[in-house]
Amino acid sequence: MFLTGSMVAIVTPMLDNGSIDFPALQALVEWHIQEKTSAIVVAGTTGESATLGPEEHTQLVTHVVKQVNRRIPVIAGSGTNSTQTTLILSENAKKAGADACLLVTPYYNKPTQNGLFEHYKTVAQKIDIPIILYNVPGRTACDLLPATVERLSTVPHIVAIKEATGQLERAQEIMQRCDKQFAVYSGDDATALSLLRHGAQGVISVTANIAPAKMQAMCTAVCQQEYTLAEKINEELMLLHQRLFIETNPIPSKWALQQMGKIKGGIRLPLLPLDNQYHLAVKEAMQRAGVN
């Protein structure tokens, strides 16, 4: 089994001018290690990967890898809608010392299933690093189907999938089709507990940005078959699961972390800070989850 538990899809702290706030990032990483987060996913969707330049992307991954210093795994989001660019970013992540790469399906291009297979196989054959597939059709307009996942699961270096459709049946089909050594991770916090109870190995989480200890505690409870405890924790977090998507992720997460004093309010266009009308809703969810 590759990795287990709560893996945070970490935000990229920014100053008001949109530049990366590396001191705030350093403090966030240390906080996650103290809170027992299983792994850090850097430069993913929640990290605003779409607006990171190539050099900036590598700088961000390198910074986190050096700071973590092997205390927990670091996963680099290095997928793009260009196979060539994905190869470059993934190779840079490997050179930086990342433990794995998370590769989102190529967005906008709308490749066929055979195109998706060839895209991932090409990267896996050329970059000697564990690869986690990432399917989030709500963002990409591209759906990696279970039959294609099954084919890819036999390709060396492809070790897992982040399944973010929120469909339990879809994840179950992938588990049935693939070898047990191929890990399935939830990419949807609101349905993560159900998926964990049905055999997923962990969750790559947005909620863990705000409540890392509770997300890890929920995963641990499931692993220890303490389902009543897991349900209790998940109930406390459910409003947060939902309202961290009241506007586009990571807008609500960044606002919540700013309220907690963890980061400043910087976010990059075309995203804007959380609209005033949603402040109370997110604050209520934070209070119910026991974070402030």
Image (cartoon, grey):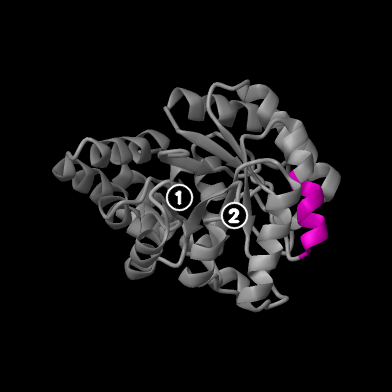
Left/right of residue 31 with respect to residue 98 in the rendered view: left
* Residue at the farthest left position: 228
Which residue does the numbered mark 2 point to in the structure image? 155
Residue range highlighted in magenta: 82-90
Q: Residue at x 20, y 48 (%)?
A: 231
Q: Position of residue 182 (x, y in %)?
A: 45, 50
In this view, 70 is above or below 83:
above
Whether residue 104 is in magenta: the answer is no
Tell me the element at label 2. loop
Which residue does the numbered mark 1 point to in the structure image? 182
**Does residue 268 appear anywhere in the picture?**
no
Residue 142, by quadrant, is bottom right
Q: Position of residue 281 (x, y in %)?
A: 40, 58
Q: In the rendered view of the protein, which quadrant contains the N terminus? A: top left
**Does residue 86 appear anywhere in the picture?**
yes
Q: Position of residue 194 (x, y in %)?
A: 27, 57
- What predominant SS class does the magenta segment belong to? helix
- Disc 1 marks a residue whose amino acid type is Phe
